[in-house]
Amino acid sequence: MKRRQLLGWSAALPLSATMTAAQAQASKDALRIAWTQTYENVDPYYGATREGLIMSRHIYDTLIYADPGGGDFKPLLATAWKWIDDTTLEFTLRQGVKFHNGAPFSADDVVDTFNRVIKPDSGVKVRSIVDWIKGAEKIDPYKVRVRLVKPYPAALDIVAGQLGIHNAAYFAQVGREGVIRAPVGTGPYRLKSQETDKGAVLERFDGYFAGGAKGKPSIKTIEVKVIPDANTQMANLMTGQIDWIWRVSSDLAGKLAKVPNITVESAETMRYVALAFDAAGRAGKSPLQDTRVRQAFSYAVNRQSLRDNLIKGKSRVLNSPCFPAQFGCSENVAKYTYDPDRAKKLLAEAGFPNGFELPMLAYTGKAETEAVAADLAKVGIKVNLRFLRSPVVRKMMEDGEAQLVMLSWGSYSVNDVSAAISMYFDGGAYDMTRDNQVRDWIKVADNSVDKEVRKRNYQLALDRIAKEAFWLPLTTTVTNYAHAKNLRFRAPPDEVPTFFDCAWT
């Protein structure tokens, strides 16, 4: 069914039909949600998809919880925590907590989880979330100390957002593949069944402890369905077969908002969109090694139009590759306004008066990417677009095979600029710039506990990234959610919706 056909039909959907569907849902104890893509798995360490991460937050608990509204840390599996020194964190654990299999939670589970995932052969998908940990030790049954390799200011953010706790005895019994297939956590929901290409069923864990930051959930069952086609998702939402969808395009969100008994909510997210240039020439010699060419890109792209006409909502144009609210992020850097004439002049100065052609990779925002390509074409830069899956593009970046990449990055929802830029400018696999000055400034900032030292060095790094146009930050992104009107849901700023605090009204 074509989009305009669907919208024409939905606008005429009888009010009584949507009311009946919503009223029927209100009497049930289930929430039915839809993902567009399959999720890898729901483990916090062995999966890397956003959908899997969201489900993981419901199945596993971390030691502490970061309030998505204010960013403050709150007690979860730990009731208290403190820094012993710059490289030692101590956690006092909650007593009386049970895993989904009935096993009691204790320091043994924390120590086993942390000491296992830091091993080089542990299979952790994203090493940066664990590489800062030197090891964990049990002080008593409900007290743990975590040793850091070196000072790491974002440690608590990572603990709160990423480091779910496995049951030590269960992991010893079933191994990595076993916990992926049948996870056992302490979270407010347990996994009842799953087929990652079709969906999953989460069931409320009635043995969940009281007093934690997540609270005991109201809704008994969360039914997750994988529905790749956005039009099918919307049709199911409007007919009451689905209760919640997300990442709705801005134009369709406006139309859905007019449908009775559907609520559309939007939130600016920490995720940004940017163009990354092969300034280091890892993929071979190209015009991108010339600063003037990279600056020409920056003048050629109409980022304000991109924001106003495609991304919309509360998004904003960025000058630095980080979210403005993150610690250490600064927009006080060189700025590039839309100026195609200046772009052409810079290209001519660099020896390309007639422009040039080069490949461009993308895995995000097809309409936005095509708009960027159209702007570049106006100044003589022809890009040959290839849309690939995110893991494929990232592998090509790692292998030095990418010249120009349209990417998005959500910083793992960590409110620190280290999560936004470090992995892309630290000299590692994803660094397409390989600039020693930027690398050294970031290294100092990442490893200092002095806030002023961190701010100063991040500012120096961001200044140079902008001046040399190593990247072209585009905009922040907006996530649009659409759901049944009688569902209490809050649109999160960190792109991690929480269903454990949803309720039917």
Image: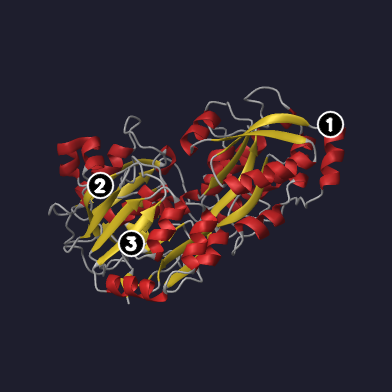
| Badge 3: residue crowd in 10 Å (few <14, some 14–19, many ≥20) | some
**Amino acid type of the residue tagged 2 in the rendering:** Gln
The image shows residue 64, relative to residue 145, as above or below, that is below
> What residue is drawn where x is 34% and y is 63%?
499
Is residue 228 visible to us here? yes
- Say which of marks 1 and 3 sits in front: 3
Q: Is residue 333 left or right of residue 142?
A: right
Q: CA distance from mark 1 to mark 3?
A: 54 Å
Q: Residue at x 51, y 61 (%)?
A: 7
Mark drawn on residue 194? 2
Secondary structure state at the residue bearing disc 2: strand
Of the image marks 1 and 2, the number of the one nearer the N terminus = 2
Do residues under tags 2 and 3 come within 8 Å of each other at their CB atoms? no
Q: Earlier in the sequence, mark 1 or mark 3?
A: 3
Q: On the image, numbered disc 1 is attached to which residue?
A: 354
Residue lying farthest left? 102
Q: Point out the residue furthest to the top here.
A: 284
